[in-house]
Amino acid sequence: GVEYSYDDMFFLRGGYQNAPNLTSDYNIYDYAFGAGIKYNVGGMDLKFDYAYRHMKVFDASNVFTVSLGL
């Protein structure tokens, strides 16, 4: 996997899982990508993240995350 960060505010992520030692029944993941943004609000970090993960057997998963913290 890789992550690119610009100004510690904008993030792009990507990855690929390759497990040649596993049979196709257990090697269900493929590629993934995502993006995020981090913004400082009153001394606290407000973060929004999105991730997409392709799966060979099931429907793809979309994950949204919102967090607030120090």
Image: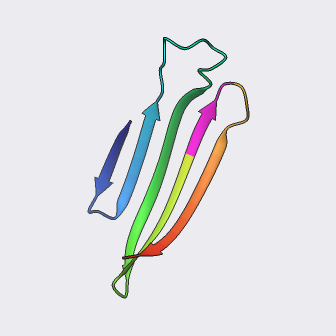
Q: x, y percentage for residue 19?
A: 48, 18
Q: x, y percentage for residue 60?
A: 67, 38
Tell me if 26 is positioned left or right of 35 in this view.
Answer: right
Vertical relation: 58 (above or below) 33: above
Question: What's the residue at 40%, 49% (across, down)?
Answer: 12
Q: From this viewpoint, which residue is outermost toward the left?
A: 7
Assess whether residue 48 is covered by the magenta stretch: no
Question: What's the residue at 66%, 25% (across, down)?
Answer: 56
Front residue of this view, candidates 28 and 36? 28
Assess whether residue 55 is covered by the magenta stretch: yes
Tell me if 55 is positioned left or right of 6 in this view.
Answer: right
The quarter of the displayed image where residue 14 is located: top left
Q: x, y percentage for residue 4?
A: 32, 48
Tell me if 27 is positioned left or right of 59 in this view.
Answer: left
Which quarter of the image is occupied by the N terminus?
top left
Question: What's the residue at 58%, 28% (across, down)?
Answer: 29
Front residue of this view, candidates 65 and 10? 65
The quarter of the displayed image where residue 54 is located: top right
Question: What's the residue at 67%, 17% (across, down)?
Answer: 25
Q: x, y percentage for residue 32?
A: 52, 37
Q: Which residues are magenta?
A: 52-56
Q: Main secondary structure of the magenta part?
A: strand
Vertical relation: 16 (above or below) 35: above
Vertical relation: 17 (above or below) 25: below
The colour mode here is rainbow
